[in-house]
Image: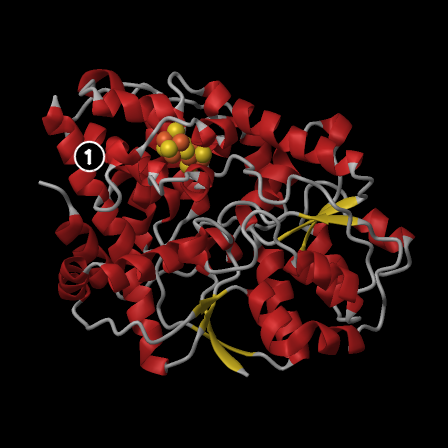
Amino acid sequence: MKVAYYPGCSLHATAKEYDQSVKAVSAALGIELKELDDWACCGATAAHSTNFKLSVALPARDLISAEKDALDVMVPCAACFNRFKSTQHHLDHDDELKKEVEKIVGKPYTGSVAIRNPIDIIANDIGLDTLKSRVKKPLKGLKPVAYYGCLLLRPPEVCNFDDYENPVLLDKMMAALGAEPKQWSYKTDCCGGSLSISRAEIVIKMVDKLMTMAREADANCIAVACPLCMANLDFRASAGVRLPVYYFTELVGIALGLQGGRDWLKLHNIDSVSLVSGLGLV
Amino acid sequence: MTQFLQEVNDRINGVPIQRCFHCRKCTAGCPLATEMEFNPNKVIRMVQMGMKDEVLNSSTIWLCASCETCVTRCPNDVDIARMMDTLRQMSIEKGLSVPQKKILALHNAFLTSIKMFGRINEPIMLAHYKLLSKDYFSDLAMGLGMFLKGKITPFGPRTRNMAAVRKIFKETKHS
Ligand code: SF4
Ligand code: SF4
């Protein structure tokens, strides 16, 4: 299958290893990615907190550009995913706003392409059975908790992705890779998001709680799908409670036996190499 | 008093917040409630009561992390997250002195980066944030760590059609 690819700012910077592992896994699973032409930032929390129209117009320009190719758009960053889904929701439900935004962007919006995150594409288009059949190194001994966070799921009528209080797709994917996902009640709790820079002390409390709860669930690592969750867990958690954190695509890549696994993990702050090398996976 | 409520409802453009029957489910699930000056359901009540100055000057509206837990769980579909966005926007438009200056400084530094490059240029954005917030010394180690790992660089690719990006900023600017 072929999809358009919107990396967003994080995947070119703090989440480089997410970008690299998404690309490697997509190539291995036969998902062709075409990077969206001349994309701009989605505006993130900064735009929707301060200026509603700006928060719709910025993603709208990228959405309209994607419609040219008539390809669905893969958006790995949960924060960008949420902004795109929310923009579509507003444009589909508010005609006046749609007209105004079309005037600003200078082109019509047709709402003809779907915004998809890679968990959805791998689980629903490629299929977990196919994924399982492709595993070369089962992740035996890896006990992740799947952490979905806020922005893939909420609000549910906008995101349209998995059960919003008890999502399971990432857990199922981890099981398909041979890992032993642990159940916990914090799958969809918030990591503090962009308060990480402006109010770090609050975010430290939030991620320490997540790490502590993951340990209580007997997990030895955390699997994430969001650069913001990764940055907060990986850089903000206190020394006594840390667990290694992995982008789920890194774990898929390692299980498929792809090259580059160790290089992705070296970019993390908390040591994430020892666990998987101790299990003989990289 | 009704004017404030009306204005907030108009801007939310969805379920009127009078639908709230104060079950406090939103507050029970709010991850930031313990840090807030007023709980989310209390803010709703204050808007209903027309307490405009108290609401627009409160730190609560800036501490909301937009996790959307409240609106997801509200039995009446009251969009509290959107209300928080709206209240922040009203406070900016009125030029009020924001109690959580560092939070707003980060938003402004972020948007300036988009206006300049179309994308976020982390080192420049963070340097700008430090100037705006006067928070010069926190997180230098974290930034340096990311820099040494080659994660952040001032030379990342930029958007080519900056005229289109600037046009968006210009035409969405509130008067
Ligand atoms: S959950 Fe909804 S109805 Fe209940 S207090 Fe909050 S806003 Fe009001
Ligand atoms: S969106 Fe804001 S008010 Fe609502 S639960 Fe999250 S932090 Fe609390």
Q: Nearer the viewer, residue A194 or A218?
A: A218
Which subunit holds the residue at mark 1? B
- Ligand 2: which quarter? top left
Q: Is residue A29 above or below residue B133?
A: below
Q: Nearer the viewer, residue A176 or A220?
A: A176
* Element type where label 1 sits in the image: helix
The quadrant of the picture occupied by the N terminus of chain A is bottom right
> How far across and how far down the image is residue A54, in percent?
24, 50
Relative side of A65 to A119, left or right = left
The residue positioned 51% from the left and 45% from the top of the image is A150
Rendered image coloring scheme: secondary structure
The quadrant of the picture occupied by the C terminus of chain A is bottom right
Q: Nearer the viewer, residue A121 or A105?
A: A121
The residue positioned 38% from the left and 48% from the top of the image is A44
Relative side of A61 to A234, left or right = left
**Numbered-mark total:** 1
Quadrant of residue A18 within the rendered picture: bottom right
> How far across and how far down the image is residue A58, in percent?
28, 57
> How far across and how far down the image is residue A73, in percent?
44, 71
Q: Which residue is mark 1?
A: B8
> How far across and how far down the image is residue A49, in percent?
31, 39
Q: Is residue A7 above or below residue B3?
A: below
User: In this rendering, does residue B155 appear at all?
Assistant: no
Q: Amino acid at mark 1?
A: Val
Q: Nearer the viewer, residue A13 or A59?
A: A59
Badge 1 density bin: few <14, some 14–19, many ≥20, Cα 10 Å: many
The residue positioned 34% from the left and 29% from the top of the image is B21
User: In this rendering, does residue B157 appear at all?
Assistant: yes
